[in-house]
Amino acid sequence: MRAKIKDVRRVVVKLGSNLFFNQAGHLALGRIYSLIEDIAAAKLDGRQMIVVSSGAVALGANALHKKAHGALLTEKQAFAAVGQSRLMNLYEQGFAKFGLIAAQVLLTEEDFSSRKRYLNLRNTLLTLLDMDVIPVINENDTVATSELEITDRNASFSDNDKLSALVMSKLEAQLLVLLSDVDGLLANDPREDPQAALIPEVREITSEIQALSGGKSARGRGGMATKLQAAEIAMNSGGMAVIANGTKPGVLARILQGDAEGTLFVGRTNALSGKRRWIAFASAVSGRIHINAGALEAVMRKNASLLYAGVTRIENRFEHGDVVAIIGPDGREVARGIVNYSSEDAAKLIGKHSDEIARLASTKNYDAFVTRDNIAFLPKNHE
């Protein structure tokens, strides 16, 4: 399977915050320029390379002689404002040595949650690639809070792991490489078992695989859990992902040659289409729709639209065109979909026949609550 990597033409490489500093806390310039050299070599070899880079907060804190860990949200945003130019300067200088041009792209969660902005961003990135430019992407930490302030409800772009997977999926790249300071997915927690064996290949993110993820990294805000989430998005988009140790010299070059570095996550053959990928992974979920067993059978097995007769209850407020989670009778999320009616109208129509929509809703646009073309099944529930 790794031999296929040699033929991959579009690659997203994510560099974690921990790669920018050595164990003494000093900027690891040699390591960063070595990675830039490998990226440049791949580009000059004919591949399209996209970089998703953490490090702005850490570089800013370092420049100000502060510690990012434990800092207030406003302080982290200030660190990002100081560090982003320093981060981009590293890439500009590094790629310039090879006659290559880097472009800074700063994103927020809204660039993905809005379908229109999502498509506009895709067009911009594809244009940059056509111009032989290397996009360097980061979340705009100075104005965004979702990456800096991680909670149970919102861990959206934690340390740019999910961001890199969304970019990979959006651009239909064939490979996502996640580089940090770990060798890959290990069979045991290395803090408890220093001899934990590396898992060389994963074909499905099972509950057992998820249980192997530990805590967050020391300098970054991500950890193995967010990397597994990113790998799963890559797999469900039909691509491959590799989690590997970016502190090892030449690691990226070896990965792109198909060598056995890190953990390889093998893509699915029944990948989601572009619009359904956005619904399933990139969009912001505004509410939850609970459905009965009959509706679940209809939408999953018969490819039917979701009608109000099969809805048992709704949660949270949402508007027409929002994305909601569709919850089965057992309480598990089975799909996501774009709703045709607001929660205010939907509350009046729960369990009702489609003939009653015109009488009860403020307007009648569709017979279905969620049209079948706008339903994206979460892959583990739709084999």
Image (tube, rainbow, N blue to C red):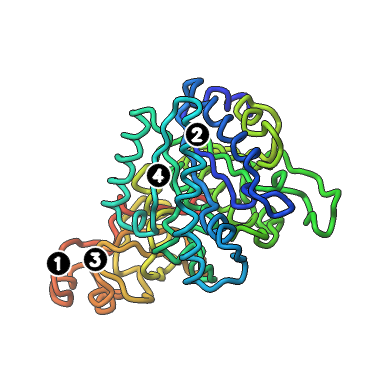
Mark sitting earlier along the chain (4/1): 4
**Residues at marks 3 and 4, CA–CA distance in whole angstroms:** 34 Å
Q: Element at badge 3?
A: loop
Residue placed most toward the observer, 253 or 20: 20
Three-letter amino acid code at the position of disc 1:
Lys
**Residues at marks 4 and 1, CA–CA distance in whole angstroms:** 45 Å
Question: Looking at the rendered structure, which numbered label has been put on residue 11?
Answer: 2
Of labels 4 and 1, the one closer to you: 4
CB of mark 4 within 8 Å of CB of mark 2? no
Q: Residue at x 50, y 28 (%)?
A: 97
Residue 104 seen by the camera: yes
Q: What percent of the width, then of the height, locates residue 152? A: 54, 71
Three-letter amino acid code at the position of disc 4:
Gln
Residue placed most toward the observer, 342 or 162: 162
- Label 3 sits on residue: 320
Q: Residue furthest top?
A: 45
Q: Residue at x 53, y 73 (%)?
A: 72
Q: What percent of the width, then of the height, locates residue 380? A: 54, 52
**Residues at marks 1 and 3, CA–CA distance in whole angstroms:** 12 Å
Mark sitting earlier along the chain (2/3): 2
**Residues at marks 4 and 2, CA–CA distance in whole angstroms:** 17 Å
- Label 1 sits on residue: 364
